[in-house]
Image: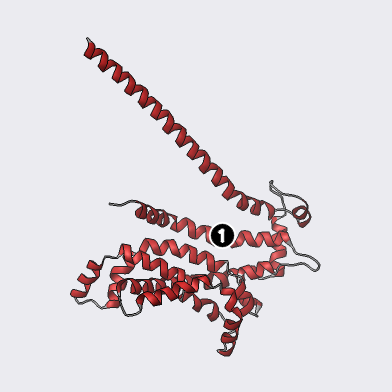
Amino acid sequence: MKQSLEIKSTSVITDKELKAKKRKSLIIITLIWIMLIISAIICLIPFYSMIITSTHANSEIARKLLMTPGDKFLDNYKRLVEVVPIWRGFANSLFITLISTVLGLYFSAMSGYGFSKYQFKGNSFLFACVLGTMMVPGQLGIIGFFRLMNEMGLINTYWPIILPSISNAFALFFFKQVADNSVPKEIVEAARIDGSREITIFHRVALPLMGPSLATLGIFLFIGKWNEFLQPMILLFDNKLQTLPVMIASVRSQFNVDYGAQYVGIVISIIPILIVFAIFSKQIIGNVMAGAVKE
């Protein structure tokens, strides 16, 4: 009898504990979902406000905060097209951004792989020097860079904007860490024993293993180059060569800034960013999860 009572009491206790744990976990999950929903709303409010504002007239934009749609989007778009060749700027930005992103990813991955797998004399010192350049703001060297490009006859061309993408200190650092963790030395050594050349090993062995990281960093490089404003404004004099951010900033009427047309241009400018993120978001999440799970 005593044993049966003890068994019943322990079973009752365990049932109560299980119910209490379920309640706690349900409360925690609910709080997490509430925080995620609030965070998502906070992140979406600027995009919503930007789209809504582009549908109103300048007088309304300057007077109050707008949260409901208007009917001036087409009028704002017509003024935008009349002032600047916005779609020409869109094509210019897309051309520069795509080439810069591809070159930046390729050469940064190659450099990071080299620092990771080749232990040459001065490796650590040279890598430290590369990281040291990250502490120097790029704006400090813009005057010297302009003079150098002017001496080389590259002003008012896309070369001074595209070529610096090859040397990206952060991307090099990022891919070195990726190569350290994702490209085993045993696979590289096995490929060398099979007689593969070093460039072939990089293309056929290392680069596929670094694929998810390429997608992750590619989004950040794409966004950074797409939104670049200072270098195109300084190095490009021909309006037909200007990028989209510079064209949007130059939208002005005779006496004041045309905010309605500017907001329409901003809406147009975020479309490629949303498309790129939508395409590569799965690779980013997969890369994050791969780094979070240990075998």
Q: Residue furthest left?
A: 193
Q: Residue furthest right?
A: 255
The percent coordinates of residue 43 (x first, y second) are 57, 50
Name the residue that disc number 1 marks. Answer: 271
The percent coordinates of residue 276 (x first, y second) are 49, 60
Q: Amino acid at mark 1?
A: Ile
* SS under mark 1: helix
Of residues 130 and 195, which is closer to you in this image?
130
The percent coordinates of residue 232 (x first, y second) are 60, 75
Of residues 169 and 153, which is closer to you in this image?
169
Camera sees residue 242: no
In the picture provided, is 233 more to the left or to the right than 194?
right
**Residue 73 location, quadrant:** bottom right
Residue depicted at x 18% and y 74%: 193
Residue depicted at x 29% and y 65%: 183
Residue depicted at x 26% and y 65%: 184
Camera sees residue 134: yes
Assess disc 1: are there few (<14), some (14-19) or many (≥20) residues with their C-alpha within 10 Å of its C-alpha.
Answer: few
**Residue 234 location, quadrant:** bottom right
The percent coordinates of residue 285 (x first, y second) are 41, 53
**Residue 116 location, quadrant:** bottom left
In the picture provided, is 103 more to the left or to the right than 239?
left
In the picture provided, is 82 more to the left or to the right than 236?
right
Of residues 110 and 136, which is closer to you in this image?
136
Residue depicted at x 28% and y 75%: 200
Numbered-mark total: 1
Q: Is residue 294 above or below residue 182?
A: above
Task: Point out the image quarter for the N terminus.
Answer: top left
Q: Residue furthest top?
A: 1
